Amino acid sequence: MGKPTTILVLLLVVLLVSDTTQQVQATPPTVRVLLARLNEDATYESQILDTLFIPWMAQSGIRVEYHYYATLSSSNNFGAVQAYLDAHDPYYDLYMLDVVWPGALGDHLADLTPFLDPVAVAQHDPNIVAAGVVGGRLIAMPTFVDFGVMYYRTDLLQRTGFASPPETWNEMQAMLTRILPAERSANPALVGYIGQMQAYEGLTCNVIEWLAGASTGSIFEPNRTLSGYLPVPTSSRAIAVRRRMRSWLTSDLIGPLSVNADEAASRAQWVQGNAVFVRHWPSLGVATHTANVSFAWNMTRIPGDKREDAGAAALGGWFLAVSKYSTNIEAAARVLQFMTSREFQRVRAVRHGVMPSVPALFDDAGVCATIGQCSLFKTLSASTLIYTAWSSILLGQAAPATALADMNRNLASTLDIDILGSPTNVEWTDAVAQAVVAVAAAGGSWSRLRQSESYGSSRTRK
Ligand SMILES: *[C@@H]1O[C@H](CO)[C@@H](O)[C@H](O)[C@H]1NC(C)=O
Ligand SMILES: *[C@@H]1O[C@H](CO)[C@@H](O)[C@H](O)[C@H]1NC(C)=O
Ligand SMILES: *[C@@H]1O[C@H](CO)[C@@H](O)[C@H](O)[C@H]1NC(C)=O
C-alpha cells in the first residue's frame, strides 16, 4: 500500500513541477525601459515605438514596457537614474543614458558582452561604442548620436561671390566682413555667426570645438592630463582662439543676441533668416526643412584654424544600459540589442531625423532623405575621436575635486581670465570667458558638473 502512495505522490510532484514550469514559460518576461523623450509631446514617438515593439515582442516572447523620464532636462534625468540605481531598485531593467553618464553609473550597470551578438556590436562606429566602455566593461550601447555641424546661407554666400562654405575661421571672417555690410540694409537683424553661447552646457560643446579645431586639445586629454598644461605652442593657440572670439564680438560678427543664445534661440534666429552661419546639431536640418524656409542653405563641417583641423565636432547622444539589479538581465539585454540595432536606428532616423551610430545607415536612401548630407555625417562618423575616454575621466575615475580645481585654474591662466577673483574680472561678453565661468560654476558641486557636461557635449572628434 505504501508503494502506490509514493508513486502517486511522485507523479503529483512531477505533474506540479512540470505544470509550474509551463506556467513560467507561458508568462513572457517583462522588460521595463526608462527612455528620454525626443520632444515634449511624446505621442508621435510612442506611435513609432509601438510599431517597432509590437512585432518584436510577438517574435521574441519578451514584453517591453517603456516609460519616459518625467522631464526633458538631462540633469533631472540623471538624478532619476542615479536614485533608482543607488537604491538597487530592480523596477527598471533598461535605462537610456546620456553619452556622458556611463562613467558615473558604471558600477551599477551590467556587462553586456556575454549577452550581445558580436556581429550586431560590430555594426556600430567603434569610436562611439567606446563611450560605453568603462573600466574595460561594455556597459552601454548607442541608440542614437549627435554631432556639431555648421549651417550656412548658400544664397548670401553666393551673392557676395563665395561659391563654397568656409573651411577655416579666417575664411569665415573674410566672408562675414563682406556679407554683413552688404546684407544688413535689407535685413538689419542679420547676425554673422550664432552658436550656443549662453553660459550653459551648450557653450561647453562650442568651446570644445573651437579648441579642438585649433589643435589645442580639448580641456582633458585621453591620458588624463589637462590640455592647458600642454606646452607652448598648444597653450598659445588656446589664447588665439579666445582672442578671435573676442574680436568677433567687438567687431559685431557675433552679435549680442548670439551671446545669449541656446539651442532654441539659435534655431529661431536661423529659421527666421537672421543668421549667415549657425553652429547646431543635425536636428536643425530637419527643423529647417519642416519650417519651409524661403532661403537656400546647406550644412558643412565646423571650420578649424587650419583646413586640416576643420570638422571638430562635439559628440552627443543616447545610450542604453542594463541595470545590474534587474531580475531579467538576459531579456533586458535582448531588448537593448533590438533598440540599438540597425533596423531600430533606421526607423528612428527616418521618422525623427536622429543620427544613427551604425555607419552603414549613411548609405541608406531613406535615412539620407530625412537627415540630408549623409556624406558629411559619414566623414564625421569615420573620423578619429580626440576624446576617447572623456566621460570616464570626468565622471568616473579622476578625483573630481582635484581635477576641477586644476582645470579651472589652468583654463583661467590659459585664457588669461581671473575666475578665482571677483566676477567683475570676467568680461561677460567674452564667449570663452563665459565658458570658463560655466565650467567653474559647475565645479562648485560634482553633480552640477555632470549637469553641465551632460547636454551631449562629452566627446570631441574631428
Ligand atoms: C598626454 O597627452 C598629451 C596630448 O596627447 C601629450 O602631449 C602629453 O605628452 C601626454 N602626457 C603624458 C604624461 O603622457
Ligand atoms: C510646409 O510646406 C508643406 C507643403 O507645402 C505644408 O504641408 C506644411 O504645412 C508647411 N509647413 C509650415 C511650417 O509652413
Ligand atoms: C550641399 O553641399 C553638398 C556638399 O558640397 C552638395 O553636394 C549638395 O548638393 C549641397 N546641397 C544643396 C541643397 O545645395
Image (tube, grey):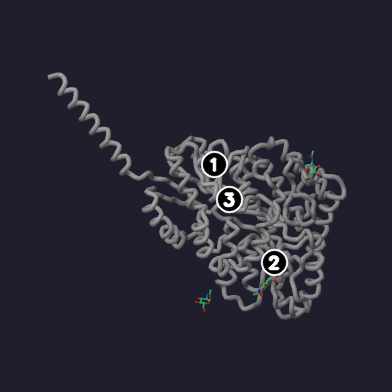
* Secondary structure state at the residue bearing disc 3: helix
Q: Which corner quadrant holds the N terminus?
A: top left
The amino acid at mark 1 is Thr
Mark 2 belongs to which amino acid?
Thr
Distance (Cα) linking label 2 and label 1: 36 Å
Q: Is residue 373 above or below residue 332?
A: below
- Residue 284, position as x, y percentages in the image: 61, 65
Residue drawn 78% across the image and 51% down it: 426
106 vs 201, nearest the viewer? 106
Residue 148 in view (yes/no): yes
Does the residue tagged 2 have its C-beta within 8 Å of any atom of ligand 3?
yes
* Circle 1 residues within 10 Å: few <14, some 14–19, many ≥20: some
Q: Position of residue 379 (x, y in %)?
A: 68, 61
Residue bearing mark 3: 122
Which quadrant holds residue 462? bottom right
**Residue that sits furthest to the left in the current view:** 1
What amino acid does circle 3 point to? Ala
Identified at 72% across, 60% down, the residue is 311
Foreground label between 2 and 1: 1
Q: Is residue 76 visible?
A: no
What label does residue 130 carry, if any?
A: none
Marks 3 and 2: CB-CB under 8 Å? no
Dot 1 or dot 3, earlier in sequence = 1
Looking at marks 3 and 2 on the same chain, the residue that comes earlier in the sequence is marked by 3
Q: Residues within 10 Å of mark 3 (few under 14, many from 20)?
A: few
Residue found at x 54% / y 62%? 349
The residue tagged 1 is 113
Could you say whether the residue bearing mark 2 is in a helix, strand or loop?
A: strand
Task: Identify the secondary structure beneath mark 1.
Answer: loop
Residue on which the image places disc 2: 300
